[in-house]
Each structure stands twice: as structure tokens, then as C-alpha cells.
Amino acid sequence: MLHLVLFLVFGAICVAGAINLLAQTHPISSALSLVVVMASLAVEYLLLGAEFVAVVQVIVYAGAVMVLFVFVIMLLNAGEEERTKGSRVAMILGVPGVLAGGLLVAWVLLKRSETGSVTLGSLPGYPKTIGNLLFHDFLLPFEVTSILVLIAIMGAVVLASRPEAQIPPPGKES
Amino acid sequence: MLSLPVFLFASLIKTVLVLFILLTAVAYTVWLERKVVGHMQNRWGPTRVGPFGLLQPLADGAKFLLKEDLTPPHVYKPLFIAAPMIAVVCALSSIAVVPFGTSLPIFGHNIPMQITDVNTGVLVILGITSVGVYGVALAGWSSNSKYSLLGGLRASAQMVSYEICLGLSLVGVLIVSGSFSLSEIVKAQGGLFWGFLPKWNILYGGQFIAFFIYLMAAYAETNRIPFDLPEAETELVAGYHTEYSAMKFAMFFMAEYANMITVACLATLLFLGGWHGPVFGPPLLQALLPTFWFVAKVFVFLFIYIWVRGTLPRFRYDQLMAFGWKFLFPLAIANLVVTALIVAYRA
């Protein structure tokens, strides 16, 4: 009972954060709403009994990835969005369309799922189990992912660096 | 195992008590710093307010409450007000997983001296520290002034970089102890080896390099000298808290010292054996002595913090970042690899 209540409360917070992200005009407010979404997802993981994943979600997503997002927004000095004139047609067709699409997806998923709901503690959540799985059963995906991340870092460095010839030598600018 | 009502009641009492003690400790750490740095600089420090200046924190608290709380007109108000709150909440919450001692037998129940014993206690503290970066970054940005923005960006970039070294230095300890839970890690450091040396992780666990990496990363995380360029007066007026006054500034101040105390507690638990120490005497004394040893070790760590503050000049920002990424990070990884090899060889 408490499990269901907590799930609904934090699910509602998550969805509210996501909607707030779209509704806010200032990018910093949107980024902080996304942090709220990440944090409530971490609580949902905790409700499933996956405490390691929950804490890693906070450390990696809320504490590192979103901090970088916030940095970028601060450095770029992104201002508030401009409001263009809304389109009546988009509102009339769009909102019911999204609702219908969402209901369709939910119906298909619920119809096809054979298992019931997951009970607390039924999935392996201990760090030891996760470590074993990661380094025994899923070793190849793990190594390939790390190479992917390395390629991404190298790509970022290459994209961000300017070629030598275009940087004017110091002292010659006037 | 305690029954639910006893657990809830005990947790409530423990939370209130720990919070009260932590806030008092924050205030008196400020006093200690002013006295110690003063004596190192051959002057007295606070002496007028009460004997040895011991009531100075009270006077400071009254001052902060009564000062005019100025909100400059050009700030982004919601975040300007929220940022010190984020900083303080994150600084005060990580004390919840720290074990202060063994369990106290009260009215027949064995109440552990720790608010919660989470399976992943070390990671909880790291996670809360990661979220605390938002307080600094948002304070710098929302103040809408050059000094604040630069100070905030520098401080948060420094904190994010040294978080990595902090975490990696702790992984060595985790490998040696085999658990994420803080009370388990402390229990694994009990006993003596060679007859008289305690089995602390810094000696027996071989984590002395990790201890020094942790020390340096902790100074950078808490923005203390020698890594306090983001708040240096000669460089950036006051960095990210330039535009803050009265209670909001006091909240940043509290957050900085509470972070110091949390980091000192973590170092004590993971490297210096936590609450282990010689235990003797009647049962009541035996239950309270571990807490005394814990507090003594935290005090030693805080004294080293303040000692370093009074002694060293500060790093320039590029030196600071180069030190973190090019020296501490490879050293932490090397420590991790060597520790893992030794533990695997012994097993």
C-alpha cells in the first residue's frame, strides 16, 4: 500500500517535472526541472529495490551530466525563449493527437506484458550482483561502451579545438 | 532488530540531536579556525566575547540574523534565493549515514549510533556532494555579476574535477573492506596487528596514498586553501557569494564548514578506523568511549585543515586544474590498480 502511494507520488513528481521542462521559458529552469526528473527516477529505482542503481543515477545523471548542461547554459548566456504566435490548428489537432498516441502505446504495452507488477527486492540490486553480471555476462558490451565513450571524448576534443593557423599569435593583435 | 515505532522515535531523536550537534560544531569550527589561524599568525584571535572568545559564534549568529538582507535588483530571484538553500541542505544531509559509535543500550533496546545504515552509504555521501555543486554554480550565475559568475564557474568546475579523484581514492578502501556500508567498513578495521598497531585502513589496508589523495581532493571539494581561488578576496572579491548578505551568506558559510566536518567524518571512518580505540571501564563508559575516539579523530582532521589554511599560499586556477587532472587522477587510478592486484593476490 505504502509502496503504491510512494510510486504514484514520485511518478507524479517525475511527470510534473517533465511537463515543467517544456513549459518553462528560461533554459536554466528547464535544466533544473530535468534534475527533478532524474531525482524522482532515482527514487523509483529505490522503490524497486535497486539501491545501487538509484545512487549511481543521482551521482552520474543529476550530479555530473546535468551539471554540465547547467554549465553550458550559463556559459552560453542563453536568454529566455521568444514566444511566437501559437497556431490554433496545432492546438486542435496536436493535444488530442498526443493523448491518443499515448493511450495507444499504453494499451499495447499493457496488453502484451505477461508478468504482473514487480515486487520489492525481486530483482538483483546488490552491488556485488551487478558487478558480477557486468564483468562476467555483459563483459563485451561493457568494453565496447567504454570504447564508444573514448571515441566521443576524442570527437569532442577535435571539434572544440581550433586549427593552429587560425589562432593569431599574441602581441600581433591590435 | 527494533520494532517500527521504537525505530521511528529513536530516528527522530537521533536526527534532532545530530543536527543540533552538527550546527554547534559548525559554529565552533569557525571559532577554532579563527583562534588557531590567529595564533599561527602571532595574534590572539577572538578574545573579547566571553572567555577565550567562546561566545563569538553566538555574536556572529545574532549579527547574521539582524543584518539587512539585501537582494540586488538585477539578480534572477528564484535561483538567487534557492542556491544557498540547496548548498545548506546538501551539506547537512550527508551526516545521516555516518556512524558515530557502536550501539547504545537504552531501556533494553540496542540503538545504533547512526541515523540510517544504508547499504550504499559511501555512495550516498558522494551523491549528495555531487548535488551540492548546484548550490555554488547557481549562486554564481543568478547573481548576474562578473565576479560571481567567474567565481561560480571556477568553483563548480573545480568541485566536479576533484569529485572524481575523491571517489577514486575511496574505491581502494571499498576494495579492501568489501562493502559500501559505512558501519561495515568501520567494523572491518577493528583489532590490532603486530600486537599494538591498529588495523586502520591507512596502515593495515595500505591506503596511505589514497589517504593523501583524499586529503587533497577534500581540500579542493570544500574550496579551502590551498584550493580556494574561487573565493579569494584579492582575485574575485568574494567569488560566488559576492552579492549575498546576512542570512544567505551565513548559509553558504555554514554549508562550507558543514562540508568540512562531513569530509573529516568520512576520512575518519574510511581511513583512520572510525570509532575504534582503546575501550575500558564500566559498561556505560564502554558504550560512550567509541564516540569520544571518533570525535577526537575528526578534531585532528579538522585541525590539519585549519593548520594547512594558516600555512600554505593558494594555487592559481590553471595549476589547480592541472594538479587535479594530470597528477591526482592518474595517481588515484594507479592506487586502485595496485590495491586490486594485492587483494586479488591475497584472496
Image: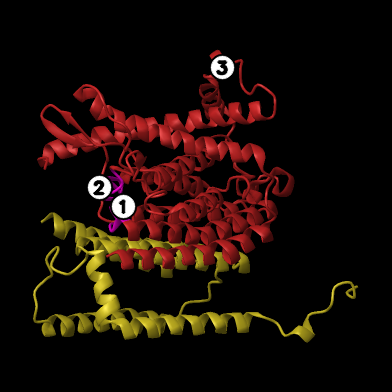
Chain given the colour yellow: A
Give the residue pinned by disc 1. Answer: B121
Q: Quadrant of residue A13?
A: bottom left
Q: Is the same chain shared between marks 3 and 1?
A: yes
Amino acid type at image mark 1: Gly
At mark 1, the secondary structure is: helix
- Residues B73 and B305: in front is B305
In the rendered image of this protein, does residue B120 appear above or below residue A137?
A: above
Q: Which residue is mark 3?
A: B52
Q: Which residue is mark 2?
A: B117
Chain of the residue that carries numbered disc 1 in the rendered image:
B
Q: Position of residue B277 (x, y in %)?
A: 33, 34
The answer to whether marks 2 and 1 mark residues whose Cβ atoms lie closer than 8 Å is yes
Residue bounds of the magenta highlight: B177-190
Residue for point 65% across, 27% down: B38
Q: What's the CA distance linking mark 3 and mark 2?
A: 39 Å
Q: Quick check: is A26 in the magenta stretch?
A: no
Question: Which chain did the renderer colour red?
Answer: B
- Which of the image's four quarters has the C terminus of chain B? bottom left
Residue A160: tell me if it is visible: yes
Instruction: Work out how far the residue at label 3 is from the one at label 1, CA to CA, in angstroms.
Output: 38 Å
In the image, is B169 to the left or to the right of A171?
A: left
Most extreme residue toward the front is B194
